[in-house]
Image (spheres, rainbow, N blue to C red):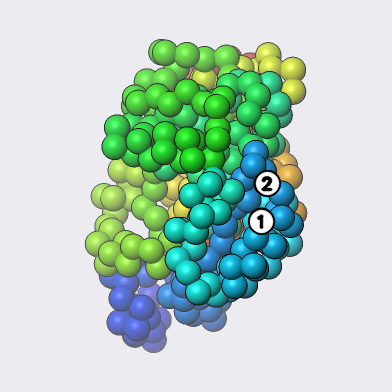
Amino acid sequence: MTVDTQQTKQELCWKHDYNDFMMGLLMKIFPLEELKKYLDSSDTERPVTIRTNTLKTRRKDLAQELINLGINVDPIDWSKEGLIVYDSPVPIGATATYLAGHYILQGAGSFLPVMALQPQPNERILDLSAAPGGKTTHIAQIMKNTGVIFANDISKERCRAVSANCHRLGVINTVICHTDGRNFPKIMTGFDRVLLDAPCTGTGVAIKDPSVKANKDAKDVKRCSHLQKELLLAAIDCCSNKSEKGGVIVYSTCSILVEENEAVIDYALKRRDVKLVETGLEFGRAGFKNFIQHRFHPSMTLTRRFYPHTHNTDGFFVAKLQKLSSKRYAKEKK
């Protein structure tokens, strides 16, 4: 690193409250001018967004209800259920409409993994890391409360949030489970689709938890990446390759770090008989095929990255895998 680059790095760390390690990772992802745009955008609050609960209402009817309350909303153009809330004279999480379960407060980026999953009515679906239930309830409404969803989380306290959201939104096709997701294949397998919104460093949502910028180090990233790899293998093992329309696993994080995204997918591609397929998402940037010293599988460009400065969402990563067989590889397959 040149003296000028080091000085620029220090200036960016000071301006945006990042530690040297985290800024170094970001400088590997973005060219300098784009990095500045990313950092400025990341320090700006994202628009408040809500997801219509189509089990109880339609988006246009919900929009009219909210407008009648003096709440200014617009539809999100790439989502069938989303609304952007521009201003509200009342707390958006305390209206009678909210309490009646007509909508849920949810970041727009969190719609993306479920859109990629494409759940179908009457399927068996596993949400392996489900709390607080935003994605679980989204899956349920697309399934029209048919079939069955197993919503699992390692945190008993956070399972209560899943339960509360399911009750408020009128979800009746969901079984809530409390176990370490890595052990789930020992309990139950054969799912048509599996969603793993993996625990991560949260680098894509630093605006919600600014401590991420200064407190994370190499050990934290390595620990997250290791856990994500174990969870993804478990998610694949829970999925049925014999499902007529499914056999699909969606992996997502609210991190933009390659170590938690492409590197995790690449690991799974080498240890399970799966392939990457199109996410079906109409926007987003292609994942990295080459990154510094890494040479990932060419199909990594099928994964999708989302950034606040280009897509006006939190930083997000989404990958969609198709399970081909139950083969496992103890070592990397050739």
Q: Is residue 55 left or right of residue 269?
A: right
- Residues under labels 1 and 2: Cα distance? 7 Å
- Residue type marked 2: Thr
Which label sits on residue 62?
1
Q: Is residue 155 left or right of residue 255?
A: left
Query: Is residue 38 in sight in this rendering?
Result: no
Query: What residue is at 65 percent from the left and 39 percent from the top?
Result: 55
Say above or below: 58 vs 139: below
Q: Is residue 308 left or right of residue 325?
A: left
Position of residue 40 measured from the top left corner of the image (x, y, whole percent): 47, 79
**Toward which corner of the image does residue 3 lie, by quadrant?**
bottom left
Can residue 243 be seen here? The reply is yes
- Residue at the spot of label 2: 57
Task: List x then y, in percent, for residue 200.
Answer: 39, 48
Type of residue at label 1?
Leu
Viewer-nearest residue: 6 or 274: 274
Mark 1 element type:
helix
